[in-house]
Image: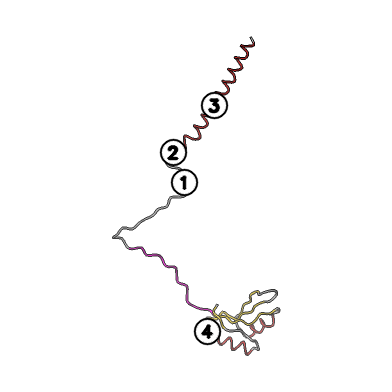
Amino acid sequence: MAEEQQDVETLKKRGRRRLVGAVALVLLAVVVLPMVFDPEPKSTLPPVSVRIPGENETPFAPKLPAKPSHRAEYVIQVGAFTRPDPVLAKLAGAKLPYYTEPAQGDLVRVRAGPFASREAADQALAKLKELGLKPGAISAK
């Protein structure tokens, strides 16, 4: 009887091993076979279409970017101030266009302009000197 019990245990072990092997083979077939038999792998990128013109068609002409207007604007640096309010009041009183820019630390850069032409900037420079300011040179914006 002990011998029969041992034969039954051996048969159960062999059966379990066969079952595990069969499951492994089926799993391998389910995973690997679709990859093997897929003729063209799926691409995640959209297809690129390329059109090559024939010899009788018009030649390639690249599109040129739009030309920016050649209208230059001129500005005059009035100065850099920690308290620009008195200077801004003078510029507003003289009816000169101006704008401010932050500079290093607590300084504020004051510029007169923009002016459409160099002549208008020259006139504004003379007006700034009449106001008692010491403006910088005229520069293109």
Residues at circles 4 and 2 in contact by the CB criterion of under 8 Å? no
The figure's colour scheme reads: secondary structure
Vertical placement of 1 versus 104: above or below?
above
Disc 4 marks which amino acid? Arg
Q: Residue at x 44, y 68 (%)?
A: 65
Secondary structure at numbered mark 2? loop
Q: Kindly identify the amino acid type of the residue bearing the numbered disc 2.
A: Asp
Return the x and y of residue 21 as percentages of the image width and height: 54, 26
Badge 2: how crowded within 10 Å, few (<14), some, or many (20+)? few
**Residue occupied by mark 1:** 43
Label 3: few (<14), some (14–19) or many (≥20) C-alpha neighbours in 10 Å? few
**Magenta stretch secondary structure, dominant:** loop
How far apart, in angstroms, are the residues tagged by discs 2 and 1? 12 Å
Disc 4 or 2, which lies upstream in sequence? 2
Res. 12 image quadrant? top right
Which residue type does callout 3 highlight? Answer: Gly
How far is mark 4 from mark 3, CA to CA?
91 Å
Name the disc covering residue 38, or none: 2
Residue 1 percent coordinates (x, y): 63, 9
- The residue indicated by pointer 4 is 118
Distance, label 4 to label 1, CA atoms, is: 60 Å
Q: Which residue is mark 3?
A: 21
93 magenta-colored = no
Q: Earlier in the sequence, mark 4 or mark 1?
A: 1
Q: Specify the segment rendered in magenta.
A: 59-73
Frontmost of labels 4 and 2 is: 2
Closer to the chain start, of discs 1 and 3, is 3
> What is the distance, in whole Å, between disc 1 and disc 3 at their CAs?
34 Å
| Quarter holding residue 17 | top right
